[in-house]
Structures are given as C-alpha cells and as structure tokens.
Amino acid sequence: MRDRHLTLVYEATGAPGGARLALVVPRRCGNAVKRNRIRRILKEEARLAPNVRAMPFDMALCWKGPITEEAARHAHREAASLLRKFADGSQCSPKPPSQPSGSTS
C-alpha cells in the first residue's frame, strides 16, 4: 500500500500476539533529527490506529523522499490514512505466512 511519502509492506504471521511494526527512514532523507522526528510521528500514529495492533501481521512503514517541513507536517495525516485503509481491509487481502524453502506440509 502506498501514499505520497509512505509505503506499507505487510505479511501475515499466522501467530497470535498482535502486530509488529518496523519503521524505515533512510539516511539519505535527512539528518538524524529529521529522521527521528518522522519516526516519532509514525510510531505515534501506529499506536493510535484502531484495530491495527491486534492484527496478526508484521508491518514495515517505509518513508520515501526528502524530509521537508511540509512533508513532516503532513506525515501524521498520511500515516493515519494509510493505517486506516489497512485496518479497514479496503486495500489488502491477508496472505498466508510464507513457508521456508525445503519444508514440507
């Protein structure tokens, strides 16, 4: 799932215990202060997102592009919108967990 500055990558874990979240903000996007600001915003939106924490998914929120003041101001809205779409299931269909190569079922 994609938005202007964010991409959400996910995979079903098949295990109970709720969602795990990884935040990816590449070094080329800005200095440490800017990257940490975006991480704090994304983490807060994931914490506040309805129903996301209880879902059995591993997720990665990936920031793309430079971190400008305008982008930082809109990060809350973009993250909330993307996570809401994910929680509603309007743009995703759960995939079964991937099997390691060489394993038999």
Image: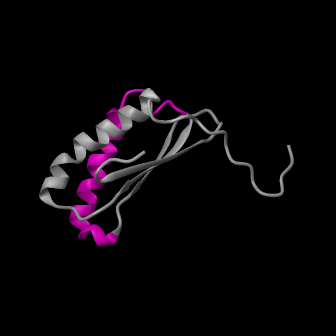
Residue lying furthest right: 104
Residue at (35% x, 37% y) in the render? 47
Query: To which quarter of the image does residue 90 belong?
Result: top left
> Could you say where residue 77 lies in the image, as x and y percent from the top left?
23, 40
Q: Is residue 30 left or right of residue 89?
A: left
Residue 39 magenta-drawn? yes
- Relative to 1, does residue 17 appear above or below in the rendering? above
Q: Residue at x 38, y 48 (%)?
A: 2
Which colouring convention does the figure follow?
one colour
Classify residue 34 as left or right of residue 24.
left
As rendered, which of 6 and 20 lies closer to the eye?
A: 6
Image location (x, y in percent) of residue 32: 26, 68
Query: In the rendered image, which quarter is residue 27 located in?
Result: bottom left
At a point 23% along the width and 48% down the height, the residue shown is: 75
Relative image position of residue 24 (x, y in whole percent)? 39, 58
Q: Tell me if I can see residue 52 in this picture.
A: no
Q: Is residue 21 visible?
A: yes
Identify which residue is drawn at 32% across, 60% down: 64
Q: Quadrant of the N terminus?
A: top left
How would you classify the magenta stretch by its main secondary structure? helix
Q: Which residues are magenta?
A: 27-55
Residue 85 at x, y = what percent? 39, 33
The quarter of the rendered structure image containing the C terminus is: top right
Determine the image quadrant of residue 94: top right
Question: Does residue 89 lie above or below 23 as drawn?
Answer: above
- Front residue of 16 and 105: 105
Q: Disc count in the image?
A: 0
> Per the image, is 93 magenta?
no
